[in-house]
């Protein structure tokens, strides 16, 4: 394990599963005008646009084409109520149909009748997740 901290000398220690160790860092003088330290819980690769967009597209395809969440036919669609809850993001009518068609295996007609499935609030209890209205993991 490599241990680093601002203002201290770095140290490297070998750790095994059964070890319990205490670490003492030696102070180190640094002359600096400004220091900015940032951290994120998001993996660095997730911040790269092509990977994030690909992952989002893949999830959208899975979600839209899953019969547990949406039922699609060219002239009629029963969609997850998430599309109704987030109408500002997905749009409605022709905008929503265009969004769904971007990922759907079955393309909707521009005049398709849209209906929204009731939201299953039981998903918050993590029961019957496969049949609830939640994004597939």
Image (cartoon, rainbow, N blue to C red):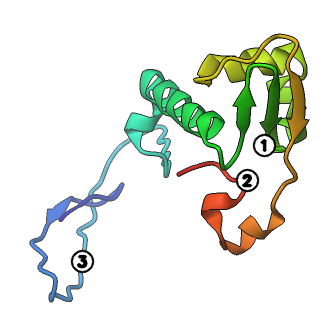
**Based on the displayed image, in which of its 4 quarters is residue 9 positioned?**
bottom left
Q: Nearer the viewer, residue 35 or 112?
A: 112
Q: Look at 20% across and 89% down and name the residue there.
A: 20
Q: Which residue is mark 2?
A: 133
Q: CA distance from mark 1 to mark 2?
A: 7 Å
Q: Which residue is mark 3?
A: 24
Q: Residues within 10 Å of mark 2 (few under 14, many from 20)?
A: many
SS type, badge 3? loop
Tell me where residue 110 appears, x and y as whole percent. 83, 10
Q: Which residue is mark 1?
A: 80
Q: Is residue 98 above or below residue 76?
A: above
Q: Residues within 10 Å of mark 3 (few under 14, many from 20)?
A: few
Q: CA distance from mark 2 to mark 3?
A: 51 Å
The mark closer to the camera, 3 or 1, is 1
Nearest to N terminus: mark 2 or mark 3: 3
Q: Is residue 91 left or right of residue 130?
A: right
């Amino acid at each position: 394990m490599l241990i680093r901290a601002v203002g201290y000398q770095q140290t490297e220690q070998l750790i095994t599963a059964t070890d319990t160790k205490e670490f003492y860092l030696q102070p180190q003088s640094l002359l600096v005008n400004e220091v900015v330290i940032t951290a994120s819980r998001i993996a660095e690769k997730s911040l790269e646009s092509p990977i994030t967009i690909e992952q989002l597209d893949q999830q959208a395809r899975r979600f839209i084409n899953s019969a547990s969440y949406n039922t699609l036919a060219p002239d009629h669609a029963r969609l997850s109520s998430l599309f109704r809850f987030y109408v500002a993001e997905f749009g409605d009518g022709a905008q929503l149909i265009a969004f769904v068609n971007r990922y759907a295996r079955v393309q909707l007609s521009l005049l398709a009748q849209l209906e929204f499935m009731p939201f299953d609030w039981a998903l918050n209890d993590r029961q019957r997740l496969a049949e609830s209205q939640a994004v597939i993991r």
